[in-house]
Image (cartoon, rainbow, N blue to C red):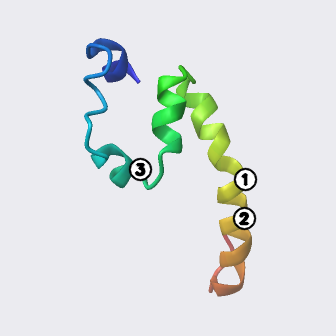
Amino acid sequence: MEMYRRVPQGKFFLKSNFFEKLAGTTELRRQIEAGLSEADIRATWQPGLQHFKEIRKKYLIYED
């Protein structure tokens, strides 16, 4: 977040989609550009994480 603020506008996310490849989606870039805080961005991950944890429960050998 700090790097995005410090780099001149339009230079942080280059024309290639390398950042999106690393993040796996364009959503993170959009959230950063919209000015969401780190806490707000992390909060958007919670539904997906909860869904993943529910699926993986049946594969765990030990309690989580």
Local SS, label 1: helix
Badge 3 local density, few (<14 within 10 Å), some, or many (20+)? Answer: few
Q: Position of residue 50 (x, y in %)?
A: 72, 59
| Cα–Cα span, label 3 and label 2 | 19 Å
Image quarter in which the N terminus is found: top left
Amino acid type, label 2 = His
Amino acid type, label 1 = Pro
Instruction: Indicate which disc, 3 or 2, sits on the residue closer to the N terminus.
Output: 3
Badge 1 local density, few (<14 within 10 Å), some, or many (20+)? Answer: few
Q: Position of residue 55 (x, y in %)?
A: 70, 76
| Cα–Cα span, label 1 and label 3 | 17 Å
Q: Front-most of 21 and 41?
A: 21
Q: Which residue is identified by label 2?
A: 51
Residue lying at the far front in this picture: please name it. 15
Q: Which residue is identified by label 1?
A: 47
Amino acid type, label 3 = Ala
Local SS, label 2: helix
Instruction: Indicate which disc, 1 or 3, sits on the residue closer to the N terminus.
Output: 3
User: Does 8 sit left or right of 31 as displayed?
Assistant: left
> Which quadrant of the structure image shows residue 5?
top left
Q: Front-most of 24 and 56?
A: 24
User: Does 61 sit left or right of 17 as displayed?
Assistant: right
Q: Which residue is identified by label 3?
A: 23
Residue ID at (34%, 52%):
22
> Which quadrant of the structure image shows residue 12?
top left
Q: Position of residue 20 (x, y in %)?
A: 38, 48
Image quarter in which the C terminus is found: bottom right
State if disc 1 and disc 2 touch (CB < 8 Å): yes
Which of the two discs, 3 and 2, sits closer to the camera? 3
